[in-house]
Image (cartoon, helix red, strand yellow):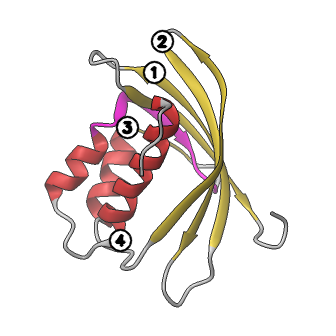
Amino acid sequence: MSHADPYINEVLVAHEFIAQVLGSPDATAAQSEALLARFDAAFTMIGVSGTRIDFAGLTQFFNTQRGSKAGLKIQIDQINVVSRWPEGAVVEYREHQTLPGQAATLRRSTVVFTLGESRCPLWRHLHETSVPMSVD
């Protein structure tokens, strides 16, 4: 999947990587490392439970959960650039996750991007909010 806007494209491509790393039993450490390279070293996140994690916590999560969600599918829609400036942007999107044999989940997320040395978007902060499936 590809989009002309670099920030929207990054959301789409990163979620493809996330689905591969978490959803494939054959996911490798190299895939986890490639995924983590998309995140700023100062990354922070507020997850759906309200827990705050930093880059070290994110690294631990992807390394310990690699391949743990066999068959994970992630669908992104309702994506919008809220604001942009020369060194970054804020993007909001809706994320629909499905796992075989489990109830689907829905969340709305807002991400703050910065531009790395190579001028590629890096995830700086992510805030996720769980949405009941019957609401949205």
Q: Contact (CB < 8 A) between labels 2 and 1? A: yes
- Disc number at residue 23? 4
What's drawn in magenta, residue-wise? 37-48
Classify residue 115 by image quadrant: top left
Label 2 to label 1, Cα distance in Å? 6 Å
Which residue is at a point 40% across and 48% down the rendered structure image?
13
Which residue is at a point 44% across and 53% down the rendered structure image?
15
Label 2 to label 4, Cα distance in Å? 32 Å
Label 1 to label 3, Cα distance in Å? 15 Å
Q: Say which of marks 3 and 2 sits in front.
A: 2
Badge 4 element: helix
Mark 2 residue crowding within 10 angstroms, few (<14) / some (14–19) / many (20+): few
The one nearer the camera, 13 or 135, is 13
First in sequence: mark 2 vs mark 4: 4
Label 1 belongs to which residue?
Answer: 114
Which residue is at a point 32% across and 56% down the rendered structure image?
62
